[in-house]
Amino acid sequence: MRHGRLPFILGFLVAPVTLYSYFVLWPYVQTINLSFYQWRGFTKKRWVGLENYDRMLHADRFWQALEHHAVILVFLPLATIAFALFFAFLLNVGGKGRGGKTAGVWGSSFYRVVFFLPQVLAVPVIGVLFATVYRPNESGLINGVLLKAGLEKPIGFLIEKNLALPALIAVLVWQAVGFYVVLFSAGMANIPAEIYEAAELDGASKVSLFFRVTLPLLWDTIQTAWVYLGILAFDAFAIVSVLAQDNGGPDGSTTVLGLEIYNNMQQSRYGDAATYGVALCVLSLVFAAFTLRLTRRESYEY
Amino acid sequence: MTTTIGRDTPGQRSGGQGARVVPKGERPRRKLNVAGGLGHVFLAVWALMIIVPLAWVFLASFKNTTEIFSSPWTVPDHLRWENWGRAWNKAHVGRYVLNSVLVVTLATAGTMLLSSMAAYVLARYKFFGNRIIYFLFVAGIAFPPFLAVVPLFFQVKQLGLLNTYTGLIIVYIAYSLPFTIFFLTSFFRSLPNSVAEAATIDGASHTRLFFSVMLPMAKPGLISLTIFNLIGQWGQFLLPLVLMAGAQNKWVLTQGIQEISTSAGYEADWSGLFAALTISILPMIVMYMVFQRQIQAGLTAGAVK
Amino acid sequence: MSVTPESPSQPNALSRRTVLQRAAVAGLVATPAVGFLAACADSGSDEESPGTANTGAVSATNPLGAPEDQPISVVIFNGGYGDKYATDVHEPMYKKAHPKSEVKHQSSQAISTLVQPLIAGGNAPEFVNNSGEKSLDFGALVADGQLQDLTALFDAPSVDDPSKKVKDTLVPGTVDTGSFNGKPYVLYYVSTVFGIWYSGKLFTDNGWAPAKTWSEFTALCDKIKAKGIAPYAYAGANAAYYQWNIILTSAAKIGGADILKNIDNLEDGAWKVDAVKQAAEAWAEIGAKYNLQGAEGLKHTDVQLKQNQYQLAMYPSGDWIENEQKKDTPEGFKYQMLTTPSITGSDKLKSTALRATAGEGYMVLAKSKNPKGGMEYMRQMLSKAGGKGFTEVVKAPTVVLGSTEGLTFTPGTQSSQDALKAAGSEVFNLFFDGWYKDLDKEARTATNELMFGRIKADAFVERIQKKADEIKKDSSITKFKR
């Protein structure tokens, strides 16, 4: 089996690695390089050393964005994973157990399809959709109902400073839950039925089934989910830019690093944009490494 | 074994089966399951939160602008199919759909081939540099793609591939690798050694082992990642915007949607926009419905144990 | 700085171009790549320009000496004006004058997306209507030598009267408007007037009269409100600059047009003068009392539609609004424009004073294959027939003198043209938003804060001044003066 091993490895890696280096890695490396220059797009680049970094660290918007990332980083994964676990549990083992078998609730295949739908919507679609959902007058999907129901003043989901960010996080959760329901369902399907059956015979309730069997056995999957959602939290740019008032507003209350990159690009400040980009990359990587370390724990053999 | 995953595997208890497993005539109701009842309410509410806005988009595609911006709960006074016609013909949505189908099909196929090759090697062979390569790929998941866009443009230009399907397809593949390799690597790791060992003893080469033994075993994983890539690439709009800008007849659907939504602001053709949105959403929904069981099965890596 | 009405001011103004550009569903679809693509021209910039030496025989019908047998490529921004005026008017005119030269027509709603890769790829089009949300940065293009110096065009004999130079057939100031460091690079073609818009029908039906003084204005607002109609609103979600434009217009009336000049020039304390504060205070009260429900969360299209549905009485905008809304405007609506009312009894400028400019920028790319052909296209555009054809199609007057003779305007355009006449010499403009986008951003945010009651006038001027000072100190930002 050793024969031809190295050529085989090389042969299989050469195409993907080449493509990836040429079209993905190298452009990123050039971006890092750009963060040390001042460049307005047409004229020659000018070396400015760490000036861009200095300016970034002194910008209010930068720190605002970091704060928002922290908030998103906590609430997006928490809410998404909680909902997704809950739904996945119901869909897979939440039904009536009978004959020693556990089953999902009635209609679970229908829910499974519906829950996943937001995942297939492209960002421009989401933007149009939620602009309507949140619209602060009688033609908004939510406010239209509330105003009919007797509410006096529409809720300014995207206008109120302390509502805007939660409203955006809600959209992210709305979109993400479906994928994680599928992911967790897969994980749950992986848990041998005997474990549940044994537990059920012991008289365990659904709740304790969930906490004593499902949760620990899904730990690996949850960890993966956390990493992914964390990355999503750093990338919240798309949603913010299509939905938030006034470019990360009101008054910067929803800005994220991606948006600051975008704003700098719009002003043809490519060096600054690259600098924010480097910050974003560093934070994403630190987060990923940190999470992996923190959540590393023996996975259960079954 | 690959075809039976959805049926006999003990671990497989997705809802579709769950419903079927109940033998007719049996009366299993041991006790009223409170969790189930309440759970139903939660599930139904969440489902409504998804269906209602989407249904609204669908309805809006038949409305006129005045109806769209009045109370959201009205139905259009008649079905204005002309909105769809406008989206399809005047806004060329039809052509964009075909372009998207072409690009996404080929790009996903390429992504799956290259990713499975790389993932397989990274998952099952120890060699110097393995971890580094793996890490570099996985790190790609964390980078915001639009950062790389300017240098990328020149990389593509250098090869003379701007405004070509080839260029776009290759770039799609490159940017889909991190995610796909990440998932497939763990998938290949979970495959049992026994089969591979048996094949090796039979004298199979590495390449044959991969194509005729490992790849079929990995089929569930491949299918679900294929779907995810189809969805992801179908919704990609940053890359085509940059790389296909100069060739409007080669635009993909998301570029079309973008153009339509921009013009909706100028010409106030909101109903045309919603018709176009519906046209762009429908194929994805249908595809997901058709393949959802395979996706489920594919993510159930352990099912192949 | 008062400028005659016929002299629309300079580039980068809050012209129709910039207004449309931001109005264009700002933020509906995020396309950072497109902006970033501006960077893509870098590598192409070292190449020798192929076009300069490309000449044909000079003749009476071809004074610029464009090569008659070579094609030109025309790119039109397919925005508020569409591209019909080019395909139906200007391009046929050019073809008729130069039958051997092919015209390749392209249109886009995202100019930089289309044009930037062409420039970067060495296929620069000859003639570009650089406008819209995704337009290219004129200043950066000039700095990089991408734009053709239009001096030869403006000095060439005009199409209608060979004894006159092109520049003498245009509204005075047109050449300067598109000049950078004294050289003309951009042709601004469309005249634009700013004010407060209302439905003539709604006002006549209710017996309301447009207000001239502030007390008349608030009384009018009260009457409208009593009718159950929202008196005044702008779109906070993406068009807050429509409102700072109004506030600064009021400020200019109170304290004179130099107020705006000082703001543009980043003079110390320019925002903190009493005139700006007074204007902000007055308008903040309108915001607090007479706003449309939820206006802060609405986009310009939503709010404009409300007005078309008679749920909103007055709306600040430029005179493109009539064309922009034509599909949703009900029969008999009759757009009319009102200039901002005088806030104090001792305003320096009359209530008829207003802000006007020329908008919609056109350029010839110096590194295209046939720049002379591109200039010849412009020369045709600047004929009387060219201007008239444009106005007929898009209902907006151009900078070509006398080209609107014999045309009947739509009610809205007629009303803004009358207002422009009435303003006499009291016409002004401002530029800071095009020069310093950060300052524009800050002004927008502060305007929303002010108009929706979260800060007072003092804090309003304070925070914008702070931003202006920061920009002034920042050596990485190129400064402009006027």
Image: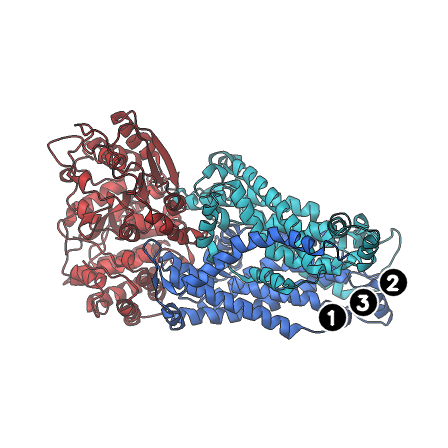
Chain colours: A blue, B cyan, C red
**SS class, disc 2:** loop
Q: Residues within 10 Å of mark 1 (few under 14, many from 20)?
A: few
Along the line of sight, the residue nearer the viewer: C42 or A294: C42
| Marks 2 & 3 on one chain | yes
Tag 1 subunit: A
Q: CA distance from mark 2 to mark 1?
A: 27 Å
Q: How many marks?
A: 3
What residue sits right under mark 1 in the picture?
A299
Does B296 appear above or below B139? above
- The kind of residue on which mark 1 rests is Ser
> Which callout, 2 or 3, points to the residue nearer the camera?
3
Q: CA distance from mark 2 to mark 3?
A: 20 Å
Along the line of sight, the residue nearer the viewer: A160 or C114: C114
Residue C78 locus on image (x, y percent): 37, 40
Does A291 appear above or below C197? below
Residue at 40% over, 53% down: C35
Q: Residues within 10 Å of mark 2 (few under 14, many from 20)?
A: few
What residue sits right under mark 2 in the picture?
A100
**SS class, disc 3:** loop
Tag 2 subunit: A
The image quarter containing residue C260 is bottom left
What residue sits right under mark 3 in the picture?
A302
- The kind of residue on which mark 3 rests is Tyr
> Which callout, 2 or 1, points to the residue nearer the camera?
1
Mark 2 or mark 3, which has the lower sequence index?
A: 2
The image quarter containing residue A20 is bottom right
Residue C477 locus on image (x, y percent): 29, 63
A33 left or right of C428 in image: right
Q: CA distance from mark 1 to mark 3?
A: 9 Å
The image quarter containing residue C252 is bottom left
